[in-house]
Structure formats: structure tokens, C-alpha cells
Amino acid sequence: MKRALFVLLIVLFAHNLIDSSLALSDYQRGALDGLNWGWNMSHRYDQAKEGDIAAYNQAVAGYNAWILAIFGMNESLMLQTIAAPAKTQPYYITKTINPKHSIDASWNQSKSLLPEPDAYGMVNGIPAEIYYSFGPALANF
């Protein structure tokens, strides 16, 4: 009987020690609440990015109330709700974009330094084929 009473006292004493060690301080409770809110808000934000914006906006109201109760009106800690995305409009290309020339930032707009043939295919009275072959070399001869 004495032994049973001794064991019972040890069990009660251990229970009191364990029970008091499981109780969290205010700081520990605040840190745990902050981690829980952060975890929940991150999940809600991921859902909002996938399209469920209403659940995130409802959770923002609760989070902001929790922040307000602890830190007061601190705008840097408050979260903003997400507005509904604008309706997407089809994308139309209205301007044709051509590749750019590597030297003068143009495409096929370079002018030749040689004179252009006239309507008869002559350059300075010489057929264009002959002029382009040796005409420029003889022009100042």
C-alpha cells in the first residue's frame, strides 16, 4: 500500500511537471500563431494565383484583424486584397516587325553607292551590265 501511494505521488508529480512544460509562454504562443497565419496565408495566396481569389480575400480580413490586435494599425504589416483580374483580351499584332540590319538598324533599305540604271537599262549611256563590270573603274580614267 505504501508503495502504491509512493508510485501515485511520483506519477502525479511527473504529470504536473509535464503539464507545466507543455504550456507555452505568450511569446511562444505568438510565434506559433504567426507561423500558422503565415502558412495559411501562403496556401491561400497560391490558391489565389490559380484563380480562387475570394478565399484569399476572406483570409486577408482575418489576418489583418489579428495584426491589428497585436501591433495596432501598422500599414507595413497589413496585407492587401487581390482585385479580380481584368478580362483578358485577345492579342493582335498591328505592326509588322522586320529584322534589323546589323550596321544601320534597317532592313533592306540600304542604297547602293552605284548609280541606278534608267528605264532603258543604261547608266550614263552605257549598258548597266558593262557599266557595273568596269565602268566605275573607267569613269575617272
Image (cartoon, grey):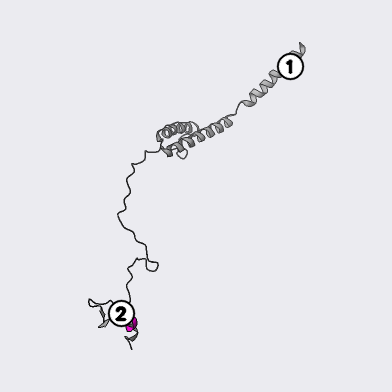
In the picture as drawn, the residue positioned furthest to the left comes out as 119
Residue assigned mark 1: 7
Residue in the foreground of this view, choosing between 71 and 3: 3
Is residue 135 left or right of 29 when viewed as pictured?
left
Residue 23: % across, % down: 61, 26
In the foreground, 114 or 20: 114
Residue at x 64%, y 26% (from the top left corner): 21
| Nearer to us in this view, 53 or 65 | 53
Magenta segment boundaries in residue numbering: 129-135
> In the picture provided, is 45 more to the left or to the right than 8?
left
Look at label 2 and name its amino acid.
Glu
Percent position (x, y) of residue 69?
48, 31
**Residue 132 highlighted magenta (yes or no):** yes
Q: Look at 48% across and 35% down and name the residue there.
A: 43
**Label 2 belongs to which residue?**
129
Query: Label 1 crowding class (10 Å Cα cut-off): few <14, some 14-19, many 20+?
Result: few
| Magenta: main secondary structure | helix
Q: Is residue 94 magenta?
A: no
What amino acid type should be assigned to the residue bearing mark 1?
Val
In the picture provided, is 63 more to the left or to the right than 16? left
Say which residue appears at 56% left-offset and 32% top-offset: 32
Q: Left or right? Give the position of 15 relative to 54.
A: right
**Of the numbered discs in the image, which one, if any, rests on residue 67?**
none
Residue 19 quadrant: top right
| Marks 1/2: CA–CA distance | 119 Å
Q: Are marks 1 and 2 in contact (CB under 8 Å)?
A: no
Q: Assign the C terminus to one quadrant of the image.
A: bottom left
Measuring 66% from the left and 24% from the top, which residue is drawn there? 18
